[in-house]
Image (tube, rainbow, N blue to C red):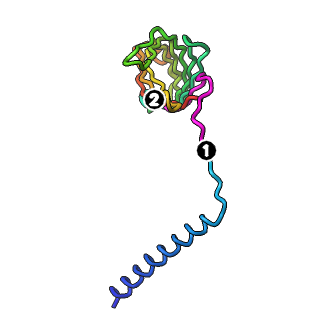
Amino acid sequence: MIKKILMLSMLSIIISSSLSAQERTSLREDRDIKTIKLDNKRGDDKFKAGVSFGYPFGVTAGYSFSNFFELNGLIGSNYHDFTVGGSALFTVADIDISGEKFPLSIGPAFYNHFGKDYKFDTLATVRLEYSFKEVPVNLFVEAGAGIRLVEFAGPAGSFALGARYIF
């Protein structure tokens, strides 16, 4: 008896959802629906913002002052502390692979780590990136090596993969 009631209930739910979906579709066709168009045209490719995954990870943004210099910032974490950092990258080469450009940049970077203890890292950073032609997206891989100046003097490093939207 309970099985029959459950089966009938399921069947009625399936039929009623199908009918209500058809009603919603016909209502949409009767109304004037607004179309939203997203324009993927780029500005001047100067500002990029997105996410950085690695050590440290977080939200990153960069502004290109010229074809050879970009200033970047990061707010996130190093998995233990809150991290704020930045880098000044100078493009030293455009690697051309089958007509696609991969800028290679180097420069200094710093990371402040706020948590139980304060830590300050200074690094030499290398970044390889790619910006798609058809969509305003920039992908990058970045690595750095340096020293920790506060808490204890010793080695420090970073490595990240990231994606940024180009404004």
Q: Label 2 vs label 1: CA separation?
A: 27 Å
Q: Amino acid at mark 1?
A: Lys
Say if the magenta span includes residue 39: yes
Residue for badge 2: 162
Nearer to us in this view, 10 or 72: 10
Q: From the viewer's perspective, tell me whether residue 87 is left or right of residue 124.
A: right
Residue drawn at x 45%, y 21% is 129
Mark 2 burial class by Cα count in 10 Å: few <14, some 14-19, many 20+:
many
Expressed as whole percent of the image width and height from the top left, the position of residue 57 reads: 47, 30
Nearer to us in this view, 93 or 116: 93
Name of the residue lying farthest toward the bottom: 1
Expressed as whole percent of the image width and height from the top left, the position of residue 29 reads: 60, 64
Residue for badge 1: 37
Viewer-nearest of labels 2 and 1? Answer: 1
Nearer to us in this view, 31 or 141: 31
Nearer to us in this view, 30 or 101: 30
Expressed as whole percent of the image width and height from the top left, the position of residue 1 reads: 33, 91
Q: Secondary structure at mark 2?
A: strand
Residue drawn at x 45%, y 27% is 139
Residue 147 visible, this angle: no
Q: Would you place residue 66 above or below residue 43 in this image?
A: above
Magenta-tinted stretch: 38-52
Q: Would you place residue 57 above or below residue 102 in this image?
A: below
Q: Secondary structure at mark 1?
A: loop
Q: Quadrant of residue 114?
A: top right
Circle on res. 150: none
